[in-house]
Amino acid sequence: MATILDVAKEAGVSQGTVSNVLNKKGNVSAEKIQAVEEAARRLGFTINERAKMLRKGSTDLLSVILPDLECSQYREFYNSFKLNAKKQNYSTEILISNDNPRTELELIQKAKSGMAHGVVSVSCLWKDDNPYQKAGIENVVFVERCPRFEAEYFGFDYKKAGKDLAEQILSKGIMNVALVTASEKFSNEREFAEAFKTRLDQNADCQVAHVVTDSFRIAHTILNIFTSAGKIDAIVTTNMGFAVKISEIQKSMFSREKFDIFTLSPVYSLPETEFIKYELNYSLLGKETANRIIQKKCAEHTYHCFENDGIRVWNNFMIREKSAKRLNLLTLEGPEALAMKGLASLYTEKTGTDVKIAVFSYDEVYEQLKSANDLQLFDIFRIDVTWLSWFSDKILYPLDEIDPDIGEIFQEYIPGLDRKYAVINGKIYALPTSPSAQMLFYRKDLFEEPAIQSLYKKRFGQKLDVPKDFKEFNQIAKFFTGFQAGTLEQSIKYGTTLTWGNTGVAATEFLCRYFSHKHHLYDSNGKIVLNDEVGKITLRELMDVIDCTDRSQTSWWTTSAKMFANGETAMSIMFTNYASEILGSGSKIIDKIGFSMVPGGNPLLGGGTLTVAKTTKYPEDALEFIKWITREPAASAIAALGGVSPCVKTYEKYNIINTFPWLELSRECFAVSKTKRPPEGMDKPFEERRFLKILGTAVKSAAQGLITEEQALWQAQAAIEREMM
């Protein structure tokens, strides 16, 4: 096995230099960093992180004791726990007890000897004494199964879950039920089973056969149920692992037997037809447990009970006696449109209303909206949020005139969305469908590569870090344009992207930079001012970075995302409702993506909102679809398919956040953004589209060298005063 000394000899440097490179310390030249890394790779040398941690006496390890990883709720919990621990620079180790008390006692000692900062346990120990305390482990949290001794505990309301599923059984008129649980010595299993049976005992006609098993005996248990029990109308179980095994045996050996399978389950984001799932948010449980055990030592006698999600109802809409046979929806091309098309078929299946989704480009959508009252083609519009003020009273049906209680829906949304995405002059005209924010995406591998960091510091005298303003952004973009290094798999052609597709989009590139210096566009008299000192600085910053981009290619944000995904660009600023394209087919940077607030920390907000056409013949049906597609669970399904969601609960789901990790930060952007475009108190609607066209024309003219930067700003200022003020 190679040692540091071997690497030093191979690279022709000192042992101290090798140590500094491998531990990312010290001021080492790019040439020596590259030599050490290549020597380490040739010799197959790796750092034993565990050994290093023990030598340092660090306590950044969290031990998680679980019965197994076959049950999806434990995988969901651990993956979420690990993700949130990693964000706070803690490592995790998973220890499997197989529900064997002797094994768990051994694992307690292992966690102790490993100097774990804390331990989380789904414990199979059920006696009154506390073996963790005896081992000297004070920072411990028990999950799902509450111990008999006093300790900190995180779990769900299993009594309510049992009662709720019993109510489901009764509502469906099911008479013969097999209840399959793990041992009732575990508090969650006992509480669920007792509540379930107590509720069903109140109905003398409903028969319950309770069977206790475990993950090792489940197949044998199910075989016995099928061969020896009488008629079975439904099987109810307490974890997805049992449910999957029951389904497999039924399909392969008893395919003629027809019954429903009810199960406790982690939260899923897409429709499920095989099981009737009662969902518990193990992702949120993992996140909160990680935060608790990291931030401070756990308090004794504390019981944390998280809210049950329950059975999510995909058909949570009103089926009208005379529903519309068809609704036509106009939307913009992008991930959100594809997701809505897929989910619309589910709505049609349940209601009988066919939802036709017409997808147009940005400019085409605007032209359709301008002629909407004349053409009367559409019932629902997906409107860019910047157009809502202009079109609201012209072509849109106020939603609170259709449903006076529509405002209650905002309790489910991210706070503050109503002001930006829904309410105009005190009336609710829309519901948010894809609230998004501009964010900076960057190649994390480039920014963290020691050789590149060393070269950057040598050239600029400062550390390569995520840019805090656009001066730093431009400097980094220039550094990476045409960058080549032996440590990279491919060269970097461009430092960044600029999205120039049309004048409106080009204006957004200007505004992104403008709002890093100033929160609003107007002076103390409410007059829009572009040709002031801030405007000059902004346009100069934008012109200064053009040569670091492939401006001939980036026509729209989906294009910018795809270019970034191709691995030839170091940074890209884009709206989050298009960012999923980074992970598209053929992406070369899936595991190399970093993200942050835009430079300046004042992000532009964008995305779309769903509205009802004033000319529709079916306003109630149109609003019913909009409410369904913008709320749980449909909204989370759109996010899981690459869009974004207005719902708070979406951002608590591990499978979505793990796939699109920038969404958590995106949610924060809505609270942070202080951008203001139209002056407050304007006595007429602000035609944002016209404003963007004027500004974008000036920006593109300057970029192409047709006029100077100063001329561009003066021309834009004159046009705005002439046409809009």
Image: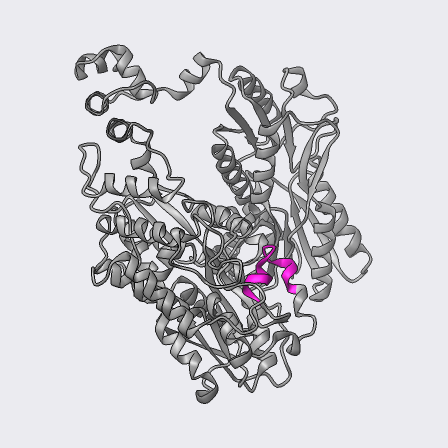
Where is the N terminus found, in terms of image quarters? top left
Spot the residue most to the bottom: 374
**Render colour scheme:** one colour
Is there any visible trace of residue 245 in the rendered image?
Answer: no
For residue 190, above or below residue 61: below
Q: Closest to the observer: 325 or 534? A: 534
Please tell me whether residue 21 is drawn above or below residue 474 in the rendered image.
Answer: above
Which quarter of the figure has residue 25?
A: top left
Determine if the magenta segment contains residue 410.
Answer: yes
The prevailing secondary structure element of the residues shown in magenta is: helix
When asked about the image quadrant of residue 550, the answer is bottom left
Up/down of 505 relative to 188, above or below: below
Q: Where 499 sits versus 322, above or below? A: above
Of residue 554 and residue 567, the one placed in the foreground of this image is: 554
Query: Is 550 one of the magenta-colored residues?
Result: no
The part of the chain drawn in magenta is 409-422
Nearer to the camera, 174 or 108: 108
- Residue depicted at 48% across the width and 86% down the height: 373
Can I make out residue 163 in this image?
Answer: yes
Looking at the picture, how far across and down is residue 295, in whole percent? 60, 29
Q: Position of residue 409 (x, y in %)?
A: 64, 64
With 33 as the anchor, is 182 left or right in this view?
Answer: right
Q: Which residue is at the far front?
A: 525
Residue at 65% over, 20% down: 138
Position in image of residue 547 (x %, y %): 21, 50
- Residue at (44, 72) in percent of width and height: 724
Q: How many marks?
A: 0
Horizontal and vertical percent position of residue 270: 50, 58
